[in-house]
Image (cartoon, rainbow, N blue to C red):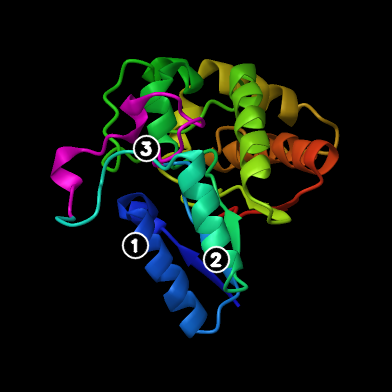
């Protein structure tokens, strides 16, 4: 079975020894797959964000007096965790999250979000209504680099792309983004599309566009199998 660990940022609140304990718990419960939910959302990778800014949680949300709520895992930390799990026949599946759950990287690189929200306050763990801009080529360039890094670190044949909790209200980010709406207009002009003018549901087509591009890169360039919630 597969256990998804980390919802709500829990992965980021754990020290390396805490994660080892969770691996042991997964083993005891008979799991052989371990999904590191939102590992890259919360800023706990030394390369994915590249700035300490993206790994600092909102002070009001620091809930642990034992484990570090701030900071990030280094490549060496991750390799050690993977090796610890492998010794116990547990495969760790890395999960990043697009297009939502991306406040950490938007805090470090606000230009990756929709333009009208570049200057908005971004509190890691507290801000939930922001997403990556679907019509920003820099987003795809940077995430290809991040995914390539993940593929290098994790031997798992799968990479989880997230996709959860990007519905209402977060998709309203795209409704108010001029660039995203231009892309949506192009998508909707395709002959096989049944237009729903003014419907917020049409923004799901933007999410499909984003996933199609990222999945294509996973398949063709890295030979990995995509997983996603796609709620």
Task: Please state which of residues 142 and 32 is positioned toward the viewer in this rendering.
Answer: 32
| 164 w.r.t. 32: above or below | above
Disc 2, SS: helix
From the top left corner, tell me how far across and down residue 139 is, in percent. 59, 24
Indicate which disc residue 147 carries. Answer: none
The reply, left or right, for residue 80 in relation to residue 10 is right
Q: Which residue is mark 2?
A: 85
Q: Residues within 10 Å of mark 2 (few under 14, many from 20)?
A: many
Please say if the residues under marks 2 and 3 sit with CB atoms less than 8 Å apart.
no
Mark before the other along the chain sequence, 2 or 1: 1
Q: CA distance from mark 3 to mark 1?
A: 30 Å
Q: Which residue is mark 1?
A: 18
Q: CA distance from mark 2 to mark 3?
A: 34 Å
From the top left corner, tell me how far across and down residue 131 is, in percent. 46, 33
The reply, left or right, for residue 106 in relation to residue 139 is left
Task: Please state which of residues 48 and 129 is positioned toward the viewer in this rendering.
Answer: 48
Q: Which residues are magenta?
A: 42-63
Indicate which disc residue 129 carries. Answer: 3
């Amino acid at each position: 079975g597969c256990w998804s660990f980390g919802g709500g940022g829990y992965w980021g609140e754990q020290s390396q020894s805490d994660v080892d304990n969770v691996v042991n718990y997964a083993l005891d419960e008979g799991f052989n797959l371990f999904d590191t939910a939102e590992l890259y959302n919360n800023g706990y990778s030394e390369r994915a964000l590249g700035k300490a800014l993206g790994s600092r949680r909102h002070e009001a949300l620091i809930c642990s007096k034992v484990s570090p709520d701030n900071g990030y895992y280094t490549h060496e930390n991750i390799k050690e965790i993977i090796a610890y799990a492998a010794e116990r026949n547990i495969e760790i599946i890395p999960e990043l999250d697009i297009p939502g759950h991306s406040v950490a990287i938007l805090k470090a690189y606000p230009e990756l979000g929709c333009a009208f929200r570049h200057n908005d306050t971004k509190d890691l763990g507290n801000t939930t209504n922001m997403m990556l801009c679907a019509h920003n080529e820099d987003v795809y360039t940077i995430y290809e680099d991040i995914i390539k890094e993940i593929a290098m670190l994790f031997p798992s044949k799968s990479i989880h792309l997230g996709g959860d909790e990007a519905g209402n209200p977060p998709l309203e980010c795209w409704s108010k983004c001029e660039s995203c709406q231009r892309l949506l207009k192009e998508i909707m002009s395709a002959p096989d599309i049944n237009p729903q003018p003014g419907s917020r549901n049409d923004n799901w087509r933007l999410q499909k566009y984003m996933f199609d591009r990222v999945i294509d890169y996973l398949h063709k360039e890295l030979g990995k199998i995509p997983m996603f919630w796609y709620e």
